[in-house]
Image (cartoon, rainbow, N blue to C red):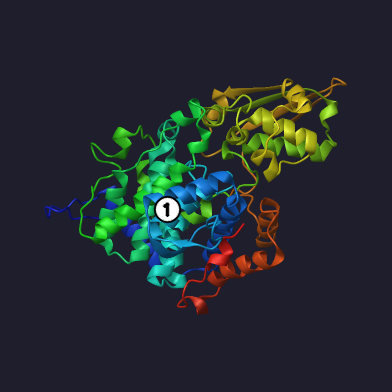
Amino acid sequence: MTATTTTPSGMERPGLPEAALVAHTLGLIERPLAAPTRERLAQALLDWFTAGCSAAALPAAGRLRELAARLFPGEGTAPVFGGTTRDPHTTLSPMAAGFANAGITHLREIDDAHRAAMLHPGVVAVSPALALAPGLGLTQRRVAQAVLAGYEVALRVGEAMGAGHAGLFHATATAGSVGAAASAAVALGLGPAAFHHALGIAATQAAGLWQLVDDGAHEAKALHPAFAVRNGLTAAFAAQAGFPGAAAFVTGRRGMRALLAGNGPVEVLAGDARDIARLHTATIKAWPACAMLFTPLDAMLSLIEDHGLRADDVAAVEVEIFSHALKIAGVHWPAAPAEAAFSLRYLLAVLLTRGRIGIADTESPQPEDPALKALAERIAVRGSEGFQQAFPGRRPSRVTVTLRSGQQLSAYRELRRGDPEDPYTWPALQARMRAFVPGMDDAQAAALVDACERLLDPARDDEPAAFPAALFGA
């Protein structure tokens, strides 16, 4: 059946891709949740909680909580990661909690990612749903549907916007705003017309400049998903109140693709009943760093593990990587802690020296360490337009190490650990959580796992969503 939509004037728009996106998404979430989708939803929630708990005690998390409380004052029932200095389990309004939690879960750069859409879907899909759940008394199934819709819309819009857009704009802030609106609209129970209006209203707020990277303002990057969730919640509430939104918000003459340098495939908006949920195509991140840099880190790790490579053995390292990576994560050497996750030379130097990259290496980097600086001087990174041809479907990189003996070792990677082709198991994801949140105790870890595993059981679908404030501690 051809998708149509009705504008406020009553004129039908047959074949509109955005109408097809709405029909596909609402059809998707009404299907019975298959076991693999339930498992993937549980993983998405555990990933989101891992990112939030890992960052909850950071000074930037405190600033986000304070900013949220100033922007959206008043009491509420939605938990916030880390609470406040006065009460570690303070609850705020949905707008405040959604804003703060989206920013906090992005601080560590360990929230999930996506190759084709080039954005972080979990922060914009999960944050609105869990912010709204306590006040609305949402069931487990309604939360699952909202998260599923947020992923579906954010990732399809992001892919339709393409690499041209993602090179200039942070798609988590642009397409992510639309995904956040989808999550919030489902949580609020909006019908098809209002759901479409919510997406259109969110699209008109879509913004997020990569200029912050060029100007060394990496610390403000976490505001992008925070703004996206604020915008998505606002859009859903506005549609619920009866405001109309643009119908052709992506493909129109003055829609997102035309104005925000979009060049991706429009046909991905429509979806197909045979498609798997886009949730299944997201990447869970293996490194506490920008996902653009993962394939060379994976390649170097394979050389370390296969050859017993040590920093003292290395005379030189050459890295060839798809050129888009250096547009987003091209920091030569970190001048501030927030830049460490975007500096490949720094990350490789740490990996070679310590055999791993832990949370502390990007939270409290040591760019003045003489050993790291000396090793980094032997690391050369260059973009490859040849590798760029495979982007964004693949992320090719080649790492070549010249040993002091003159021997050369090389490793090539185009997929990342945690990609859909190389996914985490549930036990491995729990181990990842404990590694990324070293201060978490056994009781909190067990409670988080139990809360996420509730989504696996269809018999609990009608129970109230159970994500109490205690789960949001550091």
The amino acid type found where label 1 is placed reads Ala
Total numbered badges shown on the rendered structure:
1
- Image spot of residue 57 (x, y percent): 60, 51
- Image spot of residue 81 (x, y percent): 54, 56
Task: Identify which residue is drawn at 62% across, 28% down.
Answer: 334
Residue hosting label 1: 69
Is 110 in front, or is 82? Answer: 82
Horizontally, residue 387 falls left or right of residue 8, namely right
Q: Quadrant of the rendered structure where residue 76 is? A: bottom left
Is 242 in front, or is 218? Answer: 218
Callout 1 environment at 10 Å: few (<14), some (14 to 19), or many (20+)? many
Find numbered disc 1 in the image and state the secondary structure of the residue it sits on. Answer: helix
- Image spot of residue 349 (x, y percent): 73, 30
Horizontally, residue 168 falls left or right of residue 317, namely left
Horizontally, residue 1 falls left or right of residue 90, namely left
Task: Identify which residue is drawn at 79% across, 38% down.
Answer: 354
- Image spot of residue 218 (x, y percent): 52, 34
